Every structure is written in C-alpha cells, then in structure tokens.
Amino acid sequence: MLKLNNIKKRQRSSIFGKYNYFLPEIDSTNEYAKRLALGGAPEGTVVLTDFQKEGKGRLNHRWESSKDVNILMSLILRPRLNIDQVLRLTLASAVIIIKALKKSVQHASTESVDFTVKWPNDIMANGKKIGGVLLESSLREKEVLFVVIGIGLNINQDVSILNEDIRKSATSLYAETGLTFERELIIANILNFFERDYFKMERTNYSGVIREWKNYCTHLGKEIKIESHAGEVKAIFLDINQKGILIYRTESGEEKELITGSVKHIGTGHGVND
Ligand code: BTN
C-alpha cells in the first residue's frame, strides 16, 4: 500500500502535494479529483490510489492496472491559460514525468532506460508504452476553471501476466530493469518537477517545453500512421506547433493538423528533420 508519509519525506514542493488524498480503491482518480476541484480544492492537490475500478485512458479506452504495483494519480491545476493553450499542459506533463522517471532510475543506479514521448502524451520506455497522461478540463465559455492531469505509470507491474495484445506494446520499469521501485519516491519526484517546471512554463517559457518535448520524441520527421475519428492515414510527422497540435503531411502532399487522435511510428522515413 502507498504510504503518504514516504512521499512527504521526499517532497521539496510546497504547492504540488500540499494536499494529498489517498484512497486504497476508487473508480478513477480523475473522477475523484474533478469532484474535489468542483468543491474548490486548490491547485496542486493530488489524488492517489492503489487500484481503480474504472480507470480511464485517452480516446475512451479503459486504463487497466494491477493492484498495489503502479502509479495512478491525478493533479488539480488552475492554470492561467486560455482554452487554446490547454493542450500545452499535456506535452509539458509528459516532459515532466520523463524527467522524474529518469531521476528515479538514476537513483536506483541501474542501467539507464531510454525514455521517449509519443504524441501527444504516451510515455515510452525502450520503445514500449510505460504510461500515459489523461487531461480533462472544466471550462466556462473560453475560461479554464480547472484542469485534472491523470497520470498512469507501470512501475512494478509484472507484464507477463497481461494479455498478449497489451504485452506486445506495454512495459513497466520492473520489466525494463529487473528492479522493484519505491513508488513514493517516483511520485515525490513527479511533484518536485511539476512545481519547478509548471509555474515556469505557465508564465514564460512554453517554447522551452516544446523544445524539450521534441528532444524526447523519436518519430518527428518520420513516417507515421494516424488513427482518428476520420479513420487511418499514412503521413509524415512534420512538427508540433506552439499549441501542441501535430502538423502532418498526407501522402497527397497536403499539410494538416491533428488535435485528437493517436499516432504509430511506422518507418525510418524521409521527413523534414532527418
Ligand atoms: C492514456 O490513455 O495513455 C492515458 C492513461 C491515463 C491513466 C490515468 S491512471 C490515473 C488517472 N485516472 C484515470 O482514470 N486515468 C488516469
């Protein structure tokens, strides 16, 4: 079971994690966080659990996770951004989580793991998905009232017990290193990096986030397959813009924007950044 005291001991943040809620079992930490936010919970409030009965992933997928072994958390943000800028938080969160994971792996002084991002917010370890971010926002007209950032990370998950389909594309820190990690330490690292980078980003330095995100992205400039409500298309991943939207070129040479959907890297390609 997660121990809040062990998170607190390692927290250097004062806003992120000032209020930490832990529920041994819950429907979804995002749902709980939304209820708290509606009741006025402040920015930086954290919801943690050891098991979700109805964990939610992006694009209406379910998020499955074994009990007691992974990180399932949600953060409440009250950003001074407008609706158009909210997608930035997704990319920023992915970058922050990678920094926290890298630090945690270094701390375990094991072989390094290659952490990368896949648009918009999949966290990859040695090419397989280790986690993801689900951002949900509450809006009043153009105003952002609050944002909930849901973070799911496979930490000590034994992937051999997962069904074959998931096993092909998913991994955990344990599967990549053979080590068991203290989840509280990783959570504290996430909160510490959020406190440092989120406020910087919110006020001034978003282009820094885009730069860092691109550094962690392996499929920029490459051939990708895009899956969206419009179906599947092959394309070249050209860039992401300042809003965090993916810009791609179709096979017929048109340039388009992808706001919601997912991508698969399918080739070494011949894109603009090669
Ligand atoms: C994805 O589809 O990649 C995003 C997955 C996000 C899962 C996390 S687990 C904690 C939080 N609560 C949820 O119900 N979902 C997010």
Image (cartoon, rainbow, N blue to C red):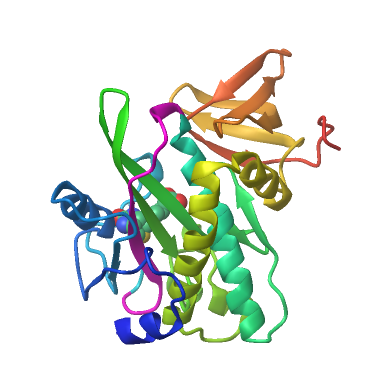
**Residue 254 at x, y percent in the picture:** 68, 13
**Residue 236 at x, y percent in the picture:** 72, 29
Which residue lies at the image location 35% right of the left edge and 64% below the top edge?
73
Between 263 and 12, the one nearer to me in the picture:
12
State left or right for residue 259 relative to residue 142: right
Which residue lies at the image location 49% right of the left edge and 53% below the top edge?
198
Q: Is residue 6 magenta?
A: no
Location of residue 103 (image quadrant):
bottom right
Q: Quadrant of ligand 1?
A: bottom left
Would residue 168 be visible to someone looking at this image?
no
Location of residue 178 (image quadrant):
bottom right
State left or right for residue 105 relative to residue 24: right
Location of residue 207 (image quadrant):
top right
Between 129 and 137, the one nearer to me in the picture:
137
Q: Is residue 102 above or below residue 177?
A: above
Q: Is residue 189 above or below residue 29?
A: below
Which residue lies at the image location 19% right of the left edge and 60% below the top edge?
27
Q: Is residue 47 above or below residue 256?
A: below
Which residue lies at the image location 41% right of the left edge and 73% below the top edge?
70
Q: Which residues are magenta?
A: 67-84
Would residue 131 be visible to someone looking at this image?
yes
Which residue appears farthest toward the left when viewing the image?
39
Between 183 and 260, the one nearer to me in the picture:
183
Q: Quadrant of the N terminus?
A: bottom left
Q: Is residue 180 above or below residue 24?
A: below
